[in-house]
Each structure stands twice: as C-alpha cells, then as structure tokens.
Image (cartoon, helix red, strand yellow):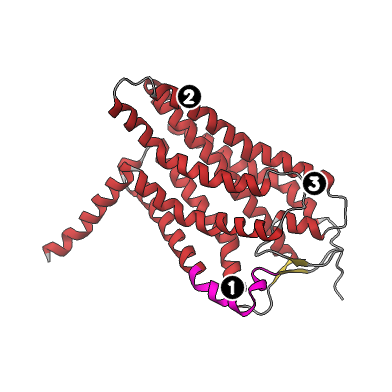
Amino acid sequence: MANLSHPSEFVLLGFSSFGELQVLLYGPFLVLYLLAFMGNTVIIVMVIADSHLHTPMYFFLGNFSLLEILVTMTAVPRMLSDLLAPHKVISFTGCMVQFYFYFSLGSTSFLVLSDMALDRFVAICHPLRYGTLMSGAVCARLVGAAWAAPFLAMVPTVLSRAHLNYCHGNIIDHFFCDNAPLLQLSCSDTSLLEFWDFVMALAFVLSSFLVTLVSYGYIASTVLQIPSASGRQKAFSTCGSHLALVFIGYSSTIFLYVRPGKAHSVEVNKTVALVTSILTPFLNPFILTLRNETIKAVLQEQMQKLKRPHRAL
C-alpha cells in the first residue's frame, strides 16, 4: 500500500459528482479554452506587431494576456483530459509543480494589473512627465518585479506542502491541486501555513488591489476637474477595459483565497475556481476589444489589410 503520509500520487475528483454526464462538459470547456487561448494570443501578436501599440499601457496588457494563457495551461488541459479519463490521478511531484505555477502566475497577473493602474494614473494625472516616469526601462523593471516576486515567494510555500503529512488520504475534491483541498488532507498542524498563505494573499492580491484603488481615486479626482464632457469621457474610456478586468479578477480571487483557514465550501470554491480558470480568460479578450478604441482600430486596420489581396485577385 502507498504511504499516505507522503502519497506517490493524488486522485483528482474533478466533476465526478456528475457521473457519466461529466463527459458532456468536455465540449463546452474545450471551446472556451481554445477561444481564450486564441483571443489572448491575438492580443499578444497585435501588441508585438503593430507600432501603434508600442506603449507602456499595451506592454502591460500583452504581459497580462500572456499570463492568462499560462494560468489556464496549468490547470485546464489536465481538467479536460480528466473529464474523459476513468482514473484521474496526478503524481505527487506533478501536483506540487501545478500548485507552484498556478499560484505564481496568478499572483503575477494581479501585480501586472496594478502596474496597468499606475500607468493610467501617470498618464492622466501627470501627462507632461509620462514619458519620463513610464520609460521603457521603468516598465521593464515593473514587469520584471511582478514576475520575479511571486515566483520567489512561492518557493517556501510549495516546499512546505511537499513536507506535510498527508494521512487523511490522497483524494483531492477538485479539478486541480488547489490550496484548501491539499491542507484538508494533512494531519500536520497547518495553522502557521494558513497564516503564511493569508500574508501572501495580502502581499500580492490585496496590496495590488489597494494600489489600483488609490490610483483610480486620483484618476477620478483629476478627470472630474476637466471642464469639457468630451474630455472627461475620453479620459475615462482609456480606463474602462482595465476597470472591468480589475472587477472580474479581484472579486473572485479575494473570495477564494483572501480568507484565513481551510474550512471552505468545496463545491463553491470549485465553481469559482472554474470561473477564474476558464471563463475569465475567455471573457478578457472580448472586454479588451469591445471597450478599447485603439485595439478596435488596430483590428479593423488589420482586417482591411487582409481583404485587400482578395480584392486585387
């Protein structure tokens, strides 16, 4: 028998409660995943290829779209294969690796969102100093810190999970190696780990959320002082898509992870995690294109270029 204090593998229940009907989930989830992948890839390609988008705002946006792709890749392909597999197992090492990358990439995405808020704050509140304050070197440092900090901070977090005693079995009632289900399998004293998780959530999620709130507080104060209605509308329009991303991303993540303790409703957490893992990355490209006039203009320009060769023929 396997040594359950350190199991060689975990069983991911996923959507086993649906029984044979879980196969029907494969098609819709696959379509959402592919659309999310293609939509975010299009944004990345546009940011790289079009000179109109070579600005700090779209540099951060390209990084955010890349993170959306990578976060979904850590959990969704595995979930899709498990929907069709009779035995939904993941190795202990594979579980720890998935845990590490999912939370590192997720934390990075929130720091990039706060970078985007800072960019809008400087652009609207200090337009004459924008070129200096948001230079290429500054943007590179901001993004570099956003990537490096979570990946470094998650090392002790994942190592602590690897050394827990899992004496309550090896069955995870989730579709990926989430934090709360792992802690529920442990018979070790996890109070210190839970406090560390809460500190990590404060450091990466709530702190970036606070930066975003303060930035938009100053933005709103500045915009309201603009005398013309058209000027106010133009200023707010540049922030609309970012605000939508902030609302969707932070609301679900704060609900899931910015709470001390491990006694959470598994089914509710699983549903909200599904929204953040597959539905939100699917919606984000549409939010960005429908509410961002610059991206819509670039898309229309590219579509016209594609049509010209056909007309010539």
**Front-lying residue, 105 or 178:** 178
Name the front one of labels 2 and 1.
Answer: 2
Mark with earlier residue (2, 1): 1
**What residue did someone put label 3 on?**
193
Instruction: Give the mark count.
Output: 3
User: What numbered label is drawn on residue 81?
Assistant: 1
Earlier residue among tags 2 and 3? 3
Front label number (2 vs 3): 2
Gap in angstroms between the C-alphas marked 2 and 3: 36 Å
- In the drawing, does residue 194 fall left or right of residue 247? right
Q: How far apart are marks 2 and 1 (CA)?
A: 47 Å
241 with respect to 198 (left or right): left
Q: In this view, does 115 lie to the left or right of 57?
A: right
Work out whether 108 lies above or below 276: above
Quick check: is 25 in the magenta stretch? yes
Question: Which residue is at the far left?
Answer: 312
Q: What residue type is labelled 1?
A: Ser
Assess whether residue 269 is covered by the magenta stretch. no
At which x and y percent is residue 163? 83, 55
Q: What residue type is labelled 3?
A: Leu
Magenta stretch: give its range. 13-28
Q: Badge 2 is on which residue?
A: 218
Which secondary structure type mostly characterizes the magenta part of the structure? helix
Q: Do the residues labelled 2 and 3 touch (CB within 8 Å)?
A: no
The residue at 46%/59% (across/down) is 36
Disc 3 element: helix
| x, y percent for residue 75 | 60, 61
